[in-house]
Amino acid sequence: MITIKNQQGEFLFRVAGILRNGNKILFQKNKKGDAWVLPGGRAEVNEPTEKAVVREFLEELGFNIKVIRLFAVIENFNAYGYKSLHEFGMYYEVSLLKQLPHDFIQFEGIEESVRLIFRWVSVDELHQVNVYHKALKPLLTDLPTDFKHLVNLDD
């Protein structure tokens, strides 16, 4: 996992995917957390980001996906409200290779080492949900057709 820590703070290199089911988008959160993020995780050294997002969906959910396109790069400072946490994220639009294995609104992931909760959130409900990064909400409400590069500050 690409993570760098020093006296100035911590840097994470994250990949994530937006997976839709009708007007709903899949989100994940740590079992103990209260913030929802797009499914994904940290890329590995010498791992292409497209392969990293495919790997993360398989490890955490058992979902086989294909990457449609890179839709955003977000440089996020004070990520998740933590001072000195800098996250560089590559955000992909993805689709399932097979039909959804279940249509639960909320369910647990399959990865043993990290207990994650997954939830489908309708686009209409996004304003009521604690979603990180804050710059994502407007993008997810109306997914842009062109590539976006954003610099975000989560306070």
Image (cartoon, helix red, strand yellow):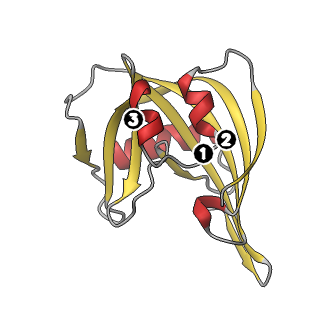
Residue 7 versus residue 18 in the image, above or below: below
Tag 3–tag 1 contact (CB < 8 Å): no
Residue type, mark 2 in image: Met
Q: Tell me which residue sits at (58%, 60%) in the image.
A: 80
Residue 58 versus residue 72 in the image, above or below: below
Q: Quadrant of residue 150?
A: top right
Q: Residues within 10 Å of mark 2 (few under 14, many from 20)?
A: many
Residue type, mark 1 in image: Val
Mark 2–mark 1 Cα distance, whole angstroms, equals 5 Å
Question: Residue 138 placed where, x, y %?
Answer: 61, 31
Residue type, mark 3 in image: Leu
Q: Give the numbered dot on residue 26.
A: 3
Q: Secondary structure at mark 3?
A: strand
Mark 3 or 1: the one toward you: 3
Tag 2–tag 1 contact (CB < 8 Å): yes
User: Which residue is tagged 2?
Assistant: 90
Quarter containing the C terminus = bottom right
Tag 3–tag 2 contact (CB < 8 Å): no
Q: Secondary structure at mark 2?
A: strand
Q: Tell me which residue sits at (39%, 19%) in the image.
A: 23
Mark 3–mark 2 Cα distance, whole angstroms, equals 17 Å
Residue reaching furthest to the bottom: 7
- Total labels: the figure holds 3
Q: Secondary structure at mark 1?
A: strand
Nearer to us in this view, 23 or 73: 23
Quarter containing the N terminus = bottom right
Q: Give the numbered dot on residue 15.
A: 1
